[in-house]
Image: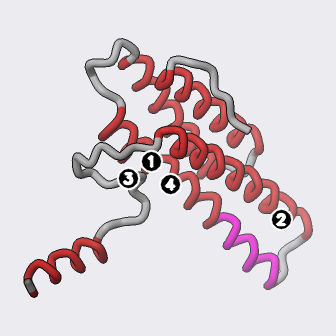
Amino acid sequence: MRRLLFAFLASALLCSTAFAHCQVPCGIYGDQLRFEKLLEDTATIAKAQGQIEELTAAGLTGQTANQLGRWIMTKDDHAATIQATIADYFLAQRIKSTSDRYVDQLKAAHAVTVAAMKCKQSTGAATAESLKVAILDLYRAYEGKEPAFD
């Protein structure tokens, strides 16, 4: 019993929260939720990019340097979360080689990963917009229909 409890606690502590879902065959998937979260992360990236531009235009003080660092970390963290969701959820679990749309899904997933990387490299608003477009294109390739998000 003690060994089982230790194994459970160790696995809970060592598991990363960056994973979109567990990688056991539980069969519990929330595809729509994942897409909504990808878009929420993209909106956060866009907000951070705007804040970075505003802070750098205002001139560097101790306070702006502090806030600037926090916005950069936030932007990069959300981009990394998007990349992890694509890799750990979609590529590892949901996109199947038996799908008729497999190649289109892989291309679309790759485009999201690259667009997220470009958001890490830039503060230009166009990169966040490109990321949003890539996510919606993945939705189309994955679901086979037009997205209908609020």
Secondary structure beneath label 4: helix
Q: Which residues are magenta?
A: 63-72
Which amino acid does the dot numbered 2 rest on? Thr
Q: Residues within 10 Å of mark 1 (few under 14, many from 20)?
A: many
* Real-space Cα separation, disc 3 to disc 2, in angstroms: 37 Å
Q: Nearer the viewer, mark 3 or mark 2?
A: 3
Q: Which residue is mark 1?
A: 85
Q: Is residue 147 magenta?
A: no
Q: Position of residue 134 (x, y in %)?
A: 59, 31
Q: Residue 21 got which mark?
A: 3
Q: Are marks 1 and 4 in contact (CB under 8 Å)?
A: yes
Secondary structure beneath label 3: loop
Which sits in the foreground, 38 or 83? 38
Tell me the chief SS of the magenta region. helix
**Quarter occupied by residue 55:** bottom right
Q: Earlier in the sequence, mark 4 or mark 2?
A: 2
Q: Earlier in the sequence, mark 1 or mark 3?
A: 3
Q: Residues within 10 Å of mark 3 (few under 14, many from 20)?
A: some
Report whether 60 appears left or right of 70.
right
Q: Is 94 situated above or below 24?
A: above
Q: Is 58 situated above or below 118?
A: below
Q: Earlier in the sequence, mark 1 or mark 2?
A: 2
Q: Which residue is mark 4?
A: 81
Q: Which residue is mark 2?
A: 56
